[in-house]
Each structure stands twice: as C-alpha cells, then as structure tokens.
Image: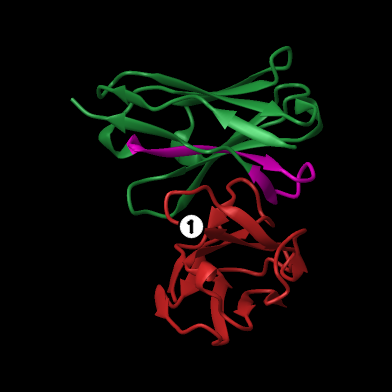
Chain colours: A red, B green
Amino acid sequence: DIQMTQSPPSLSAFVGDRVNLTCRASQNIRRYLNWYLQKQGKAPQVLISGASTLQNGVPERFSGSGSGTDFTLTISSLQPEDSATYYCQQSYSIPPITFGQGTRLEI
Amino acid sequence: QVQLVQSGAEVKEPGASVKISCEASGYTLTTHYLNWVRQGPGQGLEWVGMIDPRGGSTSYAQQFQGRVALTSDTSTSTVFLDLRSLRSDDTAVYYCARDSTDGEYVFDTWGQGTLVTVSS
C-alpha cells in the first residue's frame, strides 16, 4: 500500500498569511494526488485533483503543485473560513485508496 | 443538484451487523462509481471500498475483506454498505462519496455521514 505522510500535523496562522501544507507519498504516484478540506462536523470536500487542478467553485487562493512523491497545497491569503483539516489522497494505486493523516489549520 | 443522502445513526452491539444506505439524486446512479470512506472519532479518513452500480462489481480495502459487502439498487438509486462482526473500533462516521469520473477516484460529492456506534 502507498503511505501518505502530511506535514505539519497542525498549524496556526493569521488572516492574510500564505501557508504551505505538504504531502509525501511512499512511492512515485506521478500526479495522482487530490486535496480535500474538512470542516468540523462536516463531510470532506474536494479542492484540487491531479495535483494542481482547482475544482469548480474553489477560491483561487488555493493552489497545488508537485509530482512524483512530493506535493504542496498553498493557500495564498488565509481567510477565517479556511480553518479546517486538510487531507491529501492518492489515486494512483488502487486498491486501496489512501489518505494522509491530515493537517489541522487554525486561523 | 447532485446529492447523496445517507440513512440515520445506528447503535449496535459487538458481533452484530449494520447496513447503511446512500441514496443518490440529481444524476443517474449507474454513471459513477460510489465509494465508502469512514472516520473514527478524532481520526483521519479510511477508504472502505467501492462499487460500480452498473454491474455491481466491487473492490474492498484488505482490512475489511470478508466482513463488508457493498450492493446497489438501481431502481431506488441507492447503494448499501453491510458490515458484519462489528467491533468497537468500527465505531466511526461512514461516508459515501461519488467518483467524479469512473476510475479517477476523485470524490466530488459526499453524503452527510452516518454515525455507527458499536458498544455493549
């Protein structure tokens, strides 16, 4: 199984900050990497697919980069509503689909 | 709009079985794979398995093999998760999630979640 490791586990930042969340795969997954946001008590929602493709309706302050084993989710100017836990997910080698353990972002 | 609506919370004793449902609306069930993902209390996301509602083919995570079954009823646009021999560590919120494009495993629509509590 492909292991996904996210860092940092948690992060505190301020409105207007730029933050980078990282995700590392245990083997080459090309660009088969998706990012999700989960707010407290809610279902996850997809932000980015294919490492860098922004999903419909997702604000442009979110961006994704990387390929192979190392990936980054960047939020360019934090807003209060960005407080959430962020998960990466690989869709390269299935089964199983695997997720990172999450990064909790506090604004 | 596209929506997945799940059945309500369940409380089960260890060793019992649970069957939860996920009803799709706003699209044709057979046009997208349907996945199940669970989240234990304070934990991350864990993929359980997927079903292709067209033919009923399934794929499961290894740790659930033999205990889980996914089925679909196209007449009611509903997918079911059946989990047997429940243990306390099966206590979790179970989500159904639609694959945006079959085989891409990008989950573009999620159900609201069903809490399953396993306790004696």
The quadrant of the picture occupied by the N terminus of chain A is: bottom right
Depth check, front residue: A97 or A64: A64
Residue depicted at x 26% and y 35%? B88
Residue depicted at x 70% and y 22%? B56
Name the residue that disc number 1 marks. A39
Depth check, front residue: A49 or B110: B110
Q: Chain of mark 1?
A: A
Q: Is residue B110 above or below residue B53?
A: below
Residue depicted at x 42% and y 78%? A11
Q: Is disc 1 surrounded by few (<14), some (14 to 19) or many (20+) residues within 10 Å?
A: some
**SS class, disc 1:** loop
Q: Is residue A33 above or below residue B12?
A: below
- Give the magenta part as a residue range: B90-109
The quadrant of the picture occupied by the C terminus of chain A is: bottom left
Q: Amino acid at mark 1?
A: Lys
Residue depicted at x 63% and y 59%? A90
Q: x, y (%) of residue B31?
A: 81, 32
Please tell me whether residue B103 belongs to the stretch shown in magenta.
Answer: yes
Q: x, y (%) of residue A18?
A: 57, 87
Q: Is residue A95 above or below residue B91?
A: below
